[in-house]
Image (cartoon, rainbow, N blue to C red):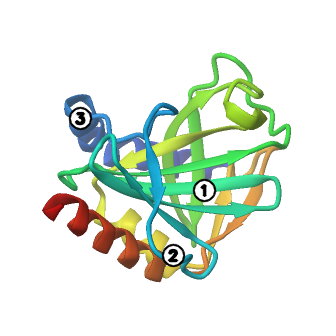
Amino acid sequence: MRNFTALIVATSVAFSSATAVYAQENPLPKASDKLVKYGDDVEGWTVYANKTRGDCLIVSAFGPGSVQMGVAANQSVGYLGVFTKLDIGIKNGVKDIFVDIDGHLYRGVVTTSTGQLKGGYSGGYILTDDPAFKRDVAKKYKMTVFPQTQGTFVVDLKGTFKAMAAGRKCLAEQKSG
C-alpha cells in the first residue's frame, strides 16, 4: 500500500501541467457533439470524427464497459475515458480515478457517480500531455482500472497502436477538410 501511495503522489505531479492545459481547452467530447464513424473498425476500436469540435476519438467496448481516447484539436492534451455499468463503488464526492498500465500508475478525475451518465455508465477521464502515458496506452496490452480497490477491472488494450494511428489520420483530415 505504501508503494501505491508513493505512485499516487508521483502521478499527481505529472498531471499538473496537463491540468493547466486542460483549463485552456476542454478536449472532452460532449453528449451534444455530432460524431460520425470514420472508416472501418480497427482491431475492435471504432474511430469517430467529431464534426462539432473538429477532432477525432477512438472507442472500444469491453463486456459491461467502454473506453474512449482522443486529443484536443490542437493536440496539446490527450484524454482516456474508462466507463462501466458495473457497481465499482464510485460515490458522490469521489474525485479520482486511477489506472495502472504495466506498473505505471496514472490519475484522472471521475466525471460522475453511478447511473448518471448515458446508459447507466460510471467512470472518468484521465487528461494528460505526458508522452509516457500515450506510449503506454499505445504499446501495452492491459490496463487495470482502480488498482487495489473493490472496483478493480481490467481493460484489454489490444489494437490501440493501430487505432491511434487511424485516429491521427482522421484528425489530419478534419484539419484539412
Q: Is residue 102 visible?
A: yes
The x, y position of residue 129, in whole percent, is 28, 53
Tell me the number on the disc at residue 160: 2
Q: Which residue is mark 1?
A: 67
Sequence-wise, which precedes: disc 2 or disc 3? 3
In the image, what residue type sits under mark 2?
A: Thr
Q: Are marks 2 and 1 in contact (CB under 8 Å)?
A: no
Q: Secondary structure at mark 1?
A: strand
159 and 21: which is toward the camera: 159
Q: Is residue 111 left or right of residue 136?
A: right
- Measured in 3D between alpha carbons, the distance from the residue under mark 2 to the one under mark 1, in whole angstroms, is 11 Å
Instruction: Report, in whole angstroms, how far the alpha carbon at label 2 lies from the one at label 3.
Output: 24 Å
Q: Secondary structure at mark 3?
A: loop
Q: Which amino acid type is marked by label 3?
A: Glu
Seen in the picture, residue 117 relative to 163 is either above or below; the reply is: above
Is 35 left, or right, of 74 in this rendering?
right
Estimate the x, y position of residue 164 in percent, counting from the top left: 41, 73
Residue hosting label 3: 25
Specify the amino acid type for callout 1: Val
